[in-house]
Image (tube, rainbow, N blue to C red):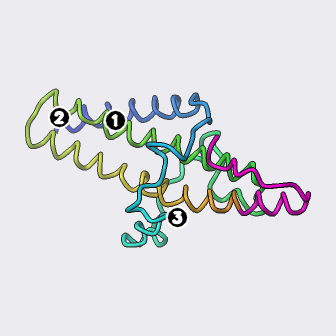
Amino acid sequence: MRKLWRSLVYFAVVGLLSNLLGACIPRRFRTDVFPFRPYAFERGGRFYDRFRIRKWKSKVPDMSKYLHALPRKALTDPSCEQVELLVQETCVAEIIHTALILLSLPVFFHEPDLESALIVIVYAAGNVPFIMIQRYNRPRLLRLAARLERTDAVEREEPVHGKVGAV
């Protein structure tokens, strides 16, 4: 039981520090290269439909409500710039949740036994859905941004440059 409490304190501290780190990360990611480029098996996010992601993704906690990130429900009448910012936020969230999984490993390496392994597995499994949500949403947001860019270009009668996702 003592190990569980130490692990919970460790995860709380790492979680708080990850939120601070996430706020400091510059939003200049290229979504057309690894690790943010969609993998072929993801099929533009459709892979995640197998997990019924549409049913549960809006039910998980949304830290953007409490941090200075753009909330996922903020796009009632989205502009291309807002959507591109949200794409960048998906990259930051993916980085943070992947880092949280990796930072759970010291719990096991400190005391490598079954209890530590179970604690790490449960903690990692709790972060995987958030990574899935980012990888599901990003291609959809990129398509929306491209559509908004085309619409804006048509309204201004300018050629479309195709810069969306290659920030």
- Mark 1, residue position: 11
Mark 3 vs 2, N-terminal side: 3
Q: Quadrant of residue 79?
A: bottom right
Mark 3 lies on a secondary structure that is helix
| Distance of label 1 from label 2 (alpha carbons) | 13 Å
Amino acid carrying label 2: it is Phe
- Mark 3, residue position: 58
Q: In the image shown, does 80 or 1 lie closer to the viewer?
A: 80
Q: Which residues are magenta?
A: 147-167
| Distance of label 3 from label 2 (alpha carbons) | 31 Å
What residue is rendered at 58% in x and 32% in y? Answer: 23
Which part of the image, by quadrant, shows the C terminus? top right
**Mark 1: few, some, or many residues within 10 Å (few <14, many ≥20)?**
some
Q: Position of residue 53 (x, y in %)?
A: 44, 68
Amino acid carrying label 1: it is Phe
Mark 2 lies on a secondary structure that is helix
Q: Do the CB atoms of the residues marked 3 and 1 lie less than 8 Å apart?
A: no
Q: Is residue 74 left or right of residue 120?
A: right
**Mark 3: few, some, or many residues within 10 Å (few <14, many ≥20)?**
few
User: Residue 166 magenta-drawn?
Assistant: yes
Q: Is residue 6 left or right of residue 26?
A: left
